[in-house]
Image: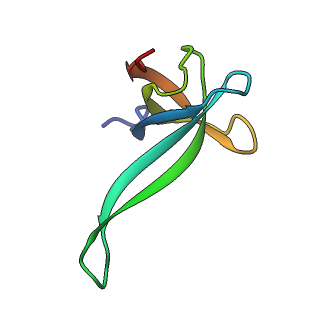
Amino acid sequence: MSDNQKQVRTLEGRVISNKMEKTVTVLIERQVQHPLLGKIVRRSTKLHAQNDLGANEGDVVRIAECRPLSKTKHHRVVEIVTRAEA
C-alpha cells in the first residue's frame, strides 16, 4: 500500500430506520464466543450512515468509514447488497 492510499473499513448490516433525511440507521450483528461460558452469543451495534443511494428499511447495505459528517454520523452507504422484499 502506497502513502496516498488509505484502507477503508467496511461493514455490512441491515437498515432498521430511514426516517431521517439523508441518514439511515444500520444494525450490525456479529457472533462472539462468551469468555467464561464458551457459548456463542449475538452482539449488535447500531450506526448512523449517510444515505445517498436511497436505501430503505430491511435492505442489507455495505457501509464504509469516512470523516465525521455530524455528531453521530461517520459512515457512508457504499452499496445496497440486497433489497428488502415488499
Q: Could you tell me which residue is drawn at 75 percent across and 44 percent down?
A: 71
What quarter of the picture does the C terminus occupy? top left
Horizontal side of residue 9 vs 25, given as left or right? left
Residue 21 versus residue 41 in the image, above or below: above
Residue 40: horizontal and vertical position, in percent? Answer: 27, 67
Which of the two residues, 59 or 7, is positioned nearer the viewer here?
Answer: 59
Which of the two residues, 8 or 41, is positioned nearer the viewer here?
Answer: 41
Q: Could you tell me which residue is drawn at 31 percent across and 64 percent down?
A: 32
Horizontal side of residue 40 vs 8, given as left or right? left
Q: How is the image coloured?
A: rainbow
Q: Could you tell me which residue is drawn at 30 percent across and 85 percent down?
A: 36
Residue 2 versus residue 86 in the image, above or below: below
Examine the image and state in which quarter residue 4 appears: top left
Residue 32 versus residue 13 in the image, above or below: below
Examine the image and state in which quarter residue 60 appears: top left
Q: Could you tell me which residue is drawn at 45 percent across and 45 percent down?
A: 28
Residue 6 versus residue 61 in the image, above or below: below
Horizontal side of residue 51 vs 30, given as left or right? right
Residue 68: horizontal and vertical position, in percent? Answer: 67, 39
Residue 15: horizontal and vertical position, in percent? Answer: 52, 32
What quarter of the picture does the N terminus occupy? top left
Farthest residue to the bottom: give it: 36
Farthest residue to the front: give it: 86
Which of the two residues, 66 or 31, is positioned nearer the viewer here?
Answer: 31
Number of marks present in the image shown:
0
Examine the image and state in which quarter residue 47 appears: top right
Residue 41: horizontal and vertical position, in percent? Answer: 33, 65
